[in-house]
């Protein structure tokens, strides 16, 4: 009987520990579930009320050309699971303004605390944005009419009820920093945009006004060596593409990121290039706009290409008058250029009636002025040399001329 | 006496707060524990009484810590993709806590990122730089500070109740009660509390207090207020989690689908979202189990209903009674005593 003390007491003791470590909690959970279902019913009621209100005001919204799919990815969005898409940056904008229409300088100083406000060179940024998506790259939500202010959606107070959007200060900074952080290794605020309050050197106050982009040094020729074993050289004549095809920068450079040009400094800091994997389609996109249907060999060759030569490419030498006119004069203004055959009538429709031979660099002597073209140019083929022997037994072209060369 | 002392402590840790509506008044809840500072006899008896009462309530005392947290408690979401590494939060934090801060411009020095830094007694928060594999030009910056755990290990470990988990979610340290044992430093899984080793007189345990003083004036925490990119999103914890989930859903390419701190160690007030895996950002990989959860359950289980002391005294009493009984009956019947003696030796 005495030994029972030594067995019973530790048993009771461990029993207590077990109940405390794993306490039974079923009743509490049942109560909680009941409360949750009640909450759900109330939530649904309020949702229905909100939907009613929305439809009452819907006439106003319809004018903005919104549909559910602009914002919701799911078929039946609910309040609990709205299935929201990202802020519809590009889809929502329905107005386009040229950089000149916008303000030149925007002063942002309503929230300045430690630093002075920012004189933002809007025009320069707008001009540069043409190369990377235009206004939408910053003004991400706009329907119709004038461009919306940031503060229309972003609250200026950081202590706020709705935290689903960043506040105004963050909205501004995030716009700038995504690019500026990448091309500058400087970490301070004092350098690029702000001036520390109280500091004497007001470096930024006048700097931004009339700021234009420094003139760019355009490359003439770019040569790439691809990884391919055969035909690994690609030559690109940048200058010819601009001069011969009337291209401006944005014709090709319309999806560039700012750092493509501006990150050079920082790249060396990291010692790495940004090498994002791109699909073949994506990689050839800038060329494929015009060069669709061309074979690979057009660009990929086993040696560097020579620059454009009309004679080599087409077999037709451009002389005198033709060498001075724009390509589009014969080949049409639209890309891709229209193919033209060697016959003059292909371009010069009313050729015989009005043609002034002086334009071809040759002035007739008096006796030849009244002649018809085909009298000299046999069969109307102007690529062949004129025939003199029909009238003159002792003369031949080009030794003897029916007039003067210009 | 030990038991009474334990009762007082447990009553202080598990006291129930009157819920306050504002997020910004951490001190309100602190007042409840202030009586420990000037513990006169009346208060001592009161606490002892409350302690005894909580004992009789049994399991209620174990779960009391949950109920003290307000539904509107604070949460801060650190969006590492938005952080630009300007370190202004470090300056603002030092300034707000009266630590030597220097000039704001000095913080644009990038060279500090070469070494991984932890918060210490001179800096309650530290920003570190990590490589961004997706874009080497945009490194990832991660701010570290006290996580203000939902079930803080430091509070559990503190033997004098100098650390308090407040109703608003913040974990604060009280100068008046701390005895400098530094158990909190050992207990914290994030290695946050630091000690002023250089001070021989009145050294403090230094850690983020979510700017209790500023919030009592209706201001935001200093780091939150100064952040240019609002990489620190301040709000109710529930709202902040909602916002974080929304961000991840809307930008699945930017973020990994994980809110660090939503469930880690039972949840924390400071939470992180990132485009990189958190182990790459030197964030400790911790389970969802709370550190104090297991230890406290065992401890509280042992002491519930006075079981161990009663058992102990009962055991001792029985032994005393047995030996006394043996002594009185020993001379009369020595043969019966011998097997009992053997049992004791075993």
Image (cartoon, helix red, strand yellow):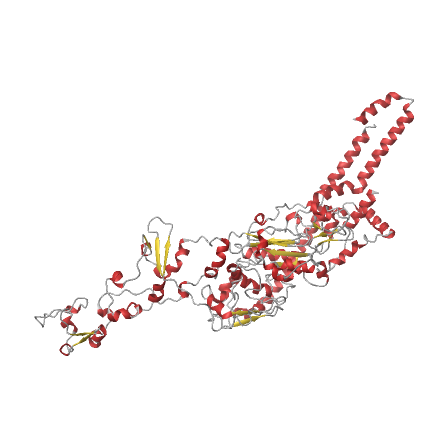
- In the rendered image, the vertical position of residue B298 relative to residue A403, given as above or below: above
Q: Where is residue B131 shown, x and y percent of the image?
A: 54, 52
Q: Where is residue B74 shown, x and y percent of the image?
A: 68, 57
Given residues B267 and A195, the one toward you in this image is A195
User: Is residue B251 shown left or right of residue B15?
Assistant: left
Given residues A145 and A399, the one toward you in this image is A399
Which residue is at a point 81% across and 41% down the rendered structure image? B306
Given residues B299 and A302, the one toward you in this image is A302
Name the image quarter holding the C terminus of chain A.
bottom left
Evaluate whether residue A405 shows in this view: yes
Q: Where is residue A245 shown, x and y percent of the image?
A: 34, 66
Pick out the residue farthest to the left: A393
Say how many tags the image has. 0
User: Is residue B2 shown left or right of residue B214?
Assistant: right
- Residue A337, quarter of the rendered image: bottom left
Pick out the residue farthest to the top: B335
């Amino acid at each position: 009987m005495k030994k029972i003390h030594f067995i019973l007491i530790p048993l009771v003791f461990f029993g207590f520990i077990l109940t405390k470590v794993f306490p039974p909690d079923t009743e509490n959970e049942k109560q909680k579930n009941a409360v949750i279902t009640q909450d759900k019913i109330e939530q649904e009621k309020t949702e229905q009320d909100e939907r009613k209100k929305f439809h009452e005001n819907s006439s106003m919204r319809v004018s903005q050309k919104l549909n559910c799919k602009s914002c919701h990815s799911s078929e039946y969005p609910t309040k609990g699971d709205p299935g929201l898409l990202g802020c519809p940056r590009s889809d929502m904008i329905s107005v386009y303004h040229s950089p000149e229409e916008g303000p030149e300088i925007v002063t942002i100083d309503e929230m300045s605390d430690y630093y002075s406000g920012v004189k933002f060179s809007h025009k320069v940024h707008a001009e540069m944005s043409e190369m990377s998506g235009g206004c939408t790259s910053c003004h991400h939500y706009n329907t119709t009419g004038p461009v919306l202010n940031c503060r229309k959606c972003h609250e200026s107070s950081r202590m706020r009820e709705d935290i689903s959007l960043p506040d105004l200060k963050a909205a501004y900074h995030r716009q700038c920093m995504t690019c500026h952080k990448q091309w500058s290794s400087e970490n301070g605020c004092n350098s690029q945009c702000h001036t520390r309050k109280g500091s004497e050197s007001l470096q930024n106050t006048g700097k931004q006004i009339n700021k234009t982009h420094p003139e760019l040094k355009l490359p003439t020729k770019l040569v790439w060596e691809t990884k391919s074993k055969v035909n690994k050289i690609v030559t690109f004549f940048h200058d010819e593409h601009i001069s011969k095809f009337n291209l401006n920068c944005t014709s090709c450079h319309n999806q560039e990121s700012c750092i493509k040009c501006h990150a050079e400094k920082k790249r060396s800091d990291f010692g790495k290039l940004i090498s994002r994997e791109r699909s073949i389609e994506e990689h050839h996109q800038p060329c494929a706009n015009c060069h669709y249907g061309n074979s690979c060999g057009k660009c990929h060759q086993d040696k560097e290409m020579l620059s454009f030569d009309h004679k080599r490419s087409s077999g037709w030498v451009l002389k005198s008058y033709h060498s001075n006119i724009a390509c589009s004069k014969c080949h049409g203004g639209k890309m891709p250029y229209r193919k033209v055959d060697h016959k003059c009538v292909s371009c010069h429709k009313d050729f015989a009636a009005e043609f002034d031979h002086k334009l071809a660099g040759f002035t007739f002597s008096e006796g030849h002025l009244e002649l018809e073209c085909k009298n000299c140019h046999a069969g109307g083929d102007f690529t062949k040399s004129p025939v003199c022997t029909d009238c003159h037994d002792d003369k031949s072209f080009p030794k003897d001329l029916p007039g003067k060369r210009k | 006496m030990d038991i009474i002392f334990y009762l007082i402590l447990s009553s202080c840790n598990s006291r129930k707060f009157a819920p306050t509506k504002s997020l910004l008044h951490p001190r309100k809840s602190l007042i409840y524990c202030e009586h420990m500072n000037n513990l006169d006899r009346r208060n001592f008896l009161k606490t002892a009484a409350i302690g005894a009462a909580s004992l009789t309530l049994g399991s209620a005392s174990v779960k009391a810590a949950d109920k003290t947290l307000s539904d509107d408690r604070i949460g801060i979401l650190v969006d590492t993709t938005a952080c630009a590494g300007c370190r202004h939060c470090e300056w603002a934090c030092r300034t707000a806590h009266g630590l030597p801060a220097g000039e704001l411009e000095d913080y644009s020095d990038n060279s500090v990122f070469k070494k991984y830094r932890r918060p210490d007694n001179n800096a309650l928060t530290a920003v570190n730089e990590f490589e961004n594999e997706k874009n080497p030009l945009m490194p990832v910056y991660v701010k570290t500070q006290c996580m203000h755990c939902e079930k803080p290990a430091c509070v559990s470990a503190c033997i004098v109740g100098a650390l308090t988990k407040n109703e608003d979610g913040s974990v604060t340290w009280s100068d008046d009660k701390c005895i400098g044992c530094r158990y909190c430093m050992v207990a914290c899984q994030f290695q946050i509390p630091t000690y002023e080793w250089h001070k021989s007189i009145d050294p403090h345990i230094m850690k983020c207090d979510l700017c209790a003083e500023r919030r009592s004036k209706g201001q935001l925490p200093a780091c939150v207020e100064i952040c240019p990119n609002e990489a620190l999103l301040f709000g109710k914890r529930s709202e902040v989690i909602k916002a974080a989930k929304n961000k991840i859903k809307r930008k699945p390419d930017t973020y990994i689908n994980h809110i660090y701190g939503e469930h880690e160690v039972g949840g924390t007030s400071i939470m992180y979202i990132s485009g990189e895996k958190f182990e790459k950002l030197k964030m400790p990989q911790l389970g969802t189990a709370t550190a104090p959860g297991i230890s406290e359950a065992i401890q509280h289980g042992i002491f519930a209903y006075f079981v161990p002391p009663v058992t102990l005294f009962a055991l001792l009493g029985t032994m005393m009674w047995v030996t006394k009984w043996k002594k009185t009956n020993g001379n009369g019947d020595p043969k019966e005593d011998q097997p009992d003696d053997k049992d004791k030796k075993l």
